Amino acid sequence: MDLAVDLAANLSVNVAVDWAADPDAWLPRLILQRGLAVIYLLAFVAAVREFRVLAGERGLTPAPALLRRVSFRQAPSLFHWRYADRLLAGVAWLGAALAGAIALGAADAVPLAGSMALWATLWVLYLSIVNVGQHWYAFGWESLLLEAGFLAVFLGNAAIAPPTLTLLLVVWLVVRVELGAGLVKWRGDRCWRQLSCLDYHHETQPMPGPFSWYFHRLPRPLHRVEVAANHVTQIVLPLGLFLPGPVATWVALAVIVTQLWLIASGNFAWLNWLTILLALAAVDGALAARHLPLPAPPADQPTAPAWFTATTWAVAALVVVLSRHPVRNLLSPRQRMNVIYNPLHLVNSYGAFASVTRLRHEIVLEGTADAEIGPETVWLPYGFHGKPGEVGRRPRQFAPFHLRLDWAMWFAALSPRFPRPWMRELVDRLLAGDAATLRLLRHNPFPDEPPRWVRARVLRYRFTTWRERRATGAWWHAEPTGEHLPPRPRPGG
């Protein structure tokens, strides 16, 4: 009888310890946190590169104008105190420096409270940028980075064993990402249900990658297999990430393979890379260690102090309460994509490509040095880094880096007859030869003097066929379809 009592007591203690911490998850946590820091680093560097032009004091959509319209409660940001381009650059460089330090191990070299402070600082700095970034920062992966960054505050560091509860919160985030993306497709464009969307998507996606041409030219039966496999991974399997042992690990592997396929076929900033990192939270570290040549776990992984455990439970309770909105959205036949329910970007809804465009249109900006324009005028195009331009230029790989202006040009081309206000501002910057704006472009055809006129045309782009590719070497075929903006003159001639 005494032996049975002792066994029951030991079992209850072991269960409690296992629920509180998972020592076998030390390597998945390590990779997740270091990888997340690298993504933070890229995001802050992108802000240094782009923000002044896109949303700075004299940006295409100035942040100070937004800050005059919204309160701190509506859009929490350090810049409510004061906005200046130099201050924005300082915040971005500080974030990049902290992210780089964490990627190199700084958060594991300090006490637990110091590690949490480092991660919390990253989150506050990036939240401050996103909340004044307007549509330039209105991408699902911006909120995903913020939500993941918030949870990273409570993942602990090398001073404690990985907290099981926080790992489950990370898994819940992955489940929402996958289910959101899968269900919104199934409920959206009928080509997803007919397994035919990839007949178009590789060609019409916002920013094709170096292998997108080859993916588009796969036989149609393989496109059907691609779509079917995507449905299985994003709709059928995600809840399996909560199952114990090898089941969750195999589901996580399926998620990772799918995300790698998406990385190979296109450029979606850090969305796919971050999803891969988050999926590692479901991997059984002990199982992986038995089958892979992994380093041995640290000999001493203390359990978390009581204050940290209590904080983790409080965060879990918050996530449970905030989850009612995304769960309702997932169950709704009118599901919406990438919904932010609170200004802190916590516990959001995700999803992408509820509809797929069948034709690709591109807005091409062109200038001329001619004083007067006519039928004989020679127009020279500006080149962008990521979006298609020269038909003989193979698409490049930029993900996980985010080219926000290139993405905005794709969205603008979805409504080619309705120019957006920022497009006119962009044309005016080109007419003025604005150096900061030109640095965001790959090619400026007027290096010595700004053009006299700039216009925006709409062209229909499609991938070349195998025969056209062999004959011309071109990756794209382009033909004009209309005008987006008529020629605009340089002020003062």
Image (tube, grey):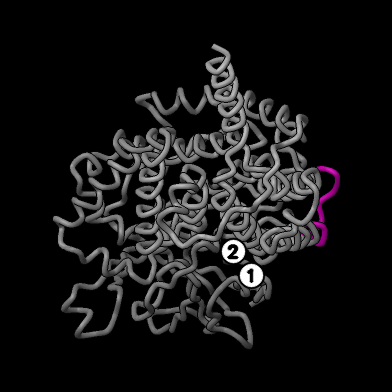
**Residue type marked 1:** Thr
The residue under label 1 is: 437
Picture quadrant where residue 345 is located = top right
Position in image of residue 57 (x %, y %): 76, 57
Residue 79 appears in the picture as rendered: no
Tell which circle, 2 or 1, labels the residue nearer the N-terminal end: 2
Residue drawn at x 63%, y 23% as measured from the top left: 317
**Residue type marked 2:** Leu
Looking at the rendering, in which quadrant would you find the N terminus?
top right
Position in image of residue 106 (x %, y %): 75, 59
Give whichever of 179, 353 is nearer the camera. 179
Position in image of residue 15 (x %, y %): 56, 27
Label pair 2/1, CB-CB below 8 angstroms: yes
Left or right, 380 with respect to 317, comes to: left
- Please, is residue 281 above or below residue 7 in the view? below
The residue under label 2 is: 426
Q: Which residues are magenta?
A: 79-88
Residue 176 appears in the picture as rendered: yes
Give whichever of 296, 348 is nearer the camera. 296
Give whichever of 39, 441 is nearer the camera. 39
Query: SS class of the residue under badge 1?
Result: helix
